[in-house]
Amino acid sequence: MSVLIQANNLHRYYGETLAVDNVSIELHQGEILALLGPNGAGKSTCLQMLCGVLAPSEGEIIINGVDLLDNPDIAKKNIGYLPDKPPLYPELTVTEYLTYAAKLRRVNTSQIKDLLKQAIQQCGLEGYNHRLIANLSKGYQQRVGIAQAIIHQPEVIILDEPTVGLDPIQMLEIRKLILQLGEQHGIILSTHILPEVQAVCNRVQMIHHGKSVINKKLSELKQSNQVTLRLQNAANIEQLKSLPGVTSVSEVSANQYILSGNKLDSSLADISKHCVESNWGLLEISPVENTLEQVFLNLTSGDNTTAAQSRLDAA
Amino acid sequence: MILHIALRELRSLFLSPLAWIILGVIQGIMAWKFLGFIDYFFTLQPELIKIKNAPGVTDLVIAPLFDFSKILLLILCPLITMRLLSEEKQNGSLKLLLSSPVSMTEIILGKYLGALAFFIIVILMIGLMPLSLFSSTDLDMGKIAAGMLGQFLTIAAFISLGLYMSSLSNQPVNAAAGTFGLLILFFIINIAGNATTQGENFFNYLSITHHSIQMLRGIVNTADIAYFVLFSLGFILLSIRQLDSQRLQS
């Protein structure tokens, strides 16, 4: 898998305020990365730096092997960007606008027609070719925004909240489109909609107060390193603690315990065996799965990021 | 690439009613003024016959007409240039340009040429009016050509200033107000030159009026051309720098 984006130690100041503090972002081909974080966390600033709209105060960005700051004209050809507000010219028709967008990306004139047809078909804009953008509904304007980001078939597609303002059916269609695009391109998207992340993304990077606090695969994020244990009889807590991999045990209610530790998944068999041998009457043993909501709330409810970070590490 | 941006700009202008309204307003007012000047020429004609080497139609009708059109252009130019960058900043479409493989210079030059193309149409339309006299009298084509060159250089300077003001502001109205104020300042700054003898040369040199009036008399001076070229180039460079600095630090 080739590395499409390699952004190291990005910093961005707005006057005195440090909006992005030492964030590094990496994107591989065939990967869909979700940039999560509460409002004002610095997600949009990060995305704008990745596509050259804003220059980072510090740090380097390499797009598909080309330095964005040294050779912007070459590097930007590989980027398709949809800002939080689609960058449309309402007085143009859909075809005129997309043709202009393709020309700006220096697409060969001979290819424009085919690419235009493809983008219109992918974004479900058939039949709207000659409508004025001003007369389209918000959802369709959003689709035109996505179409301009993919018309030149860039290696990297950067989408800032792509499903905002869409109805549930359109949302599903756009997610399907993102999944389909993600097979061949690399996609970074920022969003607040957590189910959307679960549906389409394979890696999650969370940003809080301008710092990157989590960067994990979705599957790793779900692992909580906790196991729920429900028994018929009371168990000996000291014995439970001595089991392999278990570091702490808490009793949630009568005969119900939560075991925490490292790599508990692999010691589930040992734990259940011990429970049966000790005649505690094993009723249930199951690993706890973290939901994204939990992770997100853990992260954002903390007053400072280090507290959130340590909690997450402990979890 | 500059051409694509300029054509889009011109196209969008003509898709909005503003361009048509401006063309209509200018033609209407100029036609009225044109008739006025011709009328004035007829009343003067008996006197002129008595004078040797008397000024002709070109001096008494066309030159004042071109001179007057500058005031109209001064009023209408900010209305076109105000939207060039501030509107794109306001509705977010500037991000499309900034994330595309296009340099700041290309963006600014594209915008500049788009607006310039529109105003070339405007001054050509104004120029057509006096040319209609061609069938009935002798015109001094050299003077008319010099006058047209003056019109072109003046509007090129106006647009560069307007573009710069537009790059400074996120609100088109602010850009228009700023352009308007500065243009008038450059128009009347030679008043100070006339009042004091010491600053005369300096303030006259800064003034747009001082440099454009010569061309209406048929005198094409390299110094005047240099003034307009430097004026336009200066504000174009400032606009490029402004756009770039907004990317770096906002």
Image (tube, coloured by chain):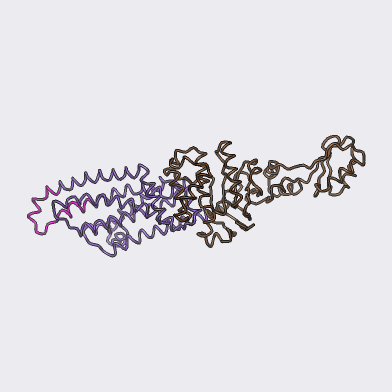
Residue farthest bottom in this picture = B222
Residue B207 highlighted magenta (yes or no): no
Q: Colour of chain A?
A: brown
User: Left or right: A304 with respect to B91?
Assistant: right
**Residue B176 at x, y percent in the picture:** 38, 47
Number of numbered markers: 0
Q: Nearer the viewer, residue A179 or B17?
A: A179
Q: Position of residue A96 (x, y in %)?
A: 43, 47
View extreme (right): residue:
A278
Residue in the foreground of this view, choosing between A276 and A231: A276
Relative to B143, A223 lies left or right: right
**B107 or A183: nearer the eye?**
A183
Q: For residue A256, say whether it is visible.
A: no
**Residue B65 appears in the figure:** yes
Q: Colour of chain B?
A: purple
Residue B221 location in percent, x, y? 26, 64
Main SS type for the magenta part?
A: helix
Image quadrant holding the N terminus of chain B, namely bottom left
| Residue B60 is one of the magenta-drawn residues | yes
Left of A181 or right of it: where is B109?
left
Query: Which residues, given as a range, are shown in magenta?
Result: B41-65
Residue B193: percent from left, percent from top: 29, 58
